[in-house]
Amino acid sequence: MSHVSARRGAFYVSVAATAWGTGGAAGSLLFQTGGLGPVDVSFWRYLLGAAFLYVTTRLASTAVRRAAVRRAAVRSVVVRPGDLGGLPRGRLDRRVLVVGVGMAVYQTAYFGAIAQSGVAIATVVTMGATPVVTALGSRFLLGERIGRTALAALAAALGGLLLLTGENALSGESVGGGRAAGIVLALVSAAGYAGVTLYSRHHSDDPQRTAMGGFAVAAACLAPFALVDGVLPAAGVTPVALLLYLGAVPTALAYGLFFRALTALNATTVSIISLGEAVSAAVLGVVLFGERLTPMAWCGCALLLAAVVVPAVRAGCTTEKD
C-alpha cells in the first residue's frame, strides 16, 4: 500500500464529504420515486458499492500487472507473482465483519432519520454529533492527542449544530413528533459512524479490503430485512440511475477515499473534515426539497463550514498529525 501524506489525506476526506453530501439527497429521492424504504436503500447502496469497488480494483490490478510485465520485458527481469498487484484477500476476518455490521447499523439509521426529519436535520445531527463521539473515543481508546485546533473546530461544530437543529431552526416548525424520532435515529447513526471510524483507524493497514469487505458484509446483514420489505425498486430510469449513482459516488468513491485518509490523519481530524457533508447536504435539502432554513440556521451552517476548513487547511500544511 502506497503512503498517503497528510495533505493528500485531507483532500481525500474533503472529496469524500462532498460526495457523501449528495447521498442523503439521492436516498430521499429514492424514497419518493423508487418506492424503497431506508433498509432497502442501504442494502442497494452497499451491494452496488461493493460491486463498483470490486470492478475498479480488478481494473487497477490488471493495469498494474501489465505495466510490471512491460517494464520487466524492457529490463529483461523475471517477474514473480508476488511482485504484481492483486485484489485484496478474499478471506473475511474480524475487522471486516465489525466494519460491515457497523456500516449496516449507522447507514440504515441515517436513512431512517432522513425519512423522519428530512435531509438537512438528519445529516447535520449525524455529522455534528459524530466528531464529538469520535474525539472522545480517539482520546481514551486510541490515545490520540486532541490539539487546540481540533478543540476549536469541535466547539464550532457544536455551536453550528445547536443553531441549525434548535427548536426554531426551521421556520415555523418545532422539533417534535417525527422530527424527534429522526434526531434519535441520527444520533444512533453518529455513534455507529464514530465506532467504524475509530475501529478502522486502529486497523488501517488495508483500507481497500476494509471498504470492499465492509460493503459486502453490510449488504449481507441487510438482505433479509430488505427482502421482507420488497427490495426491488419501482420500474423506471430514475430509480435505477439514482441507485447506480448512490453505489458509485457517495459509496465506492467516498468510502474508498475515507479509509485511505484514515491511514494518514487521526480519527478526530478525519471526522471533523467530514462535516463538509452536513453543509452540502443542508444546502441540497433547501435547493432540491424546499427545506427552509432560518437566518439562525444559516449561521449554524457557517460555523460548521468553519469547523471543516480550519483542520483541513492545517492538515494540508503539515505532515504532523494534529
Image (spheres, rainbow, N blue to C red):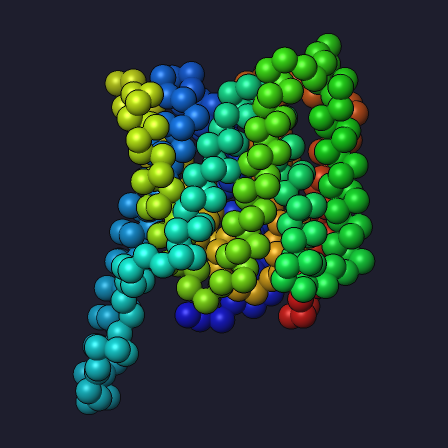
Furthest-bottom residue in view?
76
Q: How many marks?
A: 0
- Residue 103 position in % (x across, y down): 46, 43
- Residue 204 position in % (x across, y down): 49, 63
Tell me: 192 left or right of 81: right
- Dividing the picture into quarters, in which one does residue 101 lie? top left
Q: Height in image: 117 above or below 13?
A: above
Furthest-top residue in view?
172
Tell me: 78 left or right of 247: left
Q: Quadrant of the C terminus?
A: bottom right
- Dividing the picture into quarters, in which one does residue 321 lie? bottom right
**Residue at the image position 44 percent from the left and 51 percent from the top:** 98
Q: Is residue 285 visible?
A: no
**Residue at the image position 49 percent from the left and 71 percent from the top:** 3
Tell me: 65 left or right of 308: left
Q: Height in image: 12 above or below 3?
A: above
**Residue at the image position 59 percent from the left and 31 percent from the top:** 186
- Residue 150 position in % (x across, y down): 74, 54
- Dividing the picture into quarters, in which one does residue 182 lie? top right
- Residue 124 position in % (x across, y down): 64, 33
Q: Is residue 190 visible?
A: yes
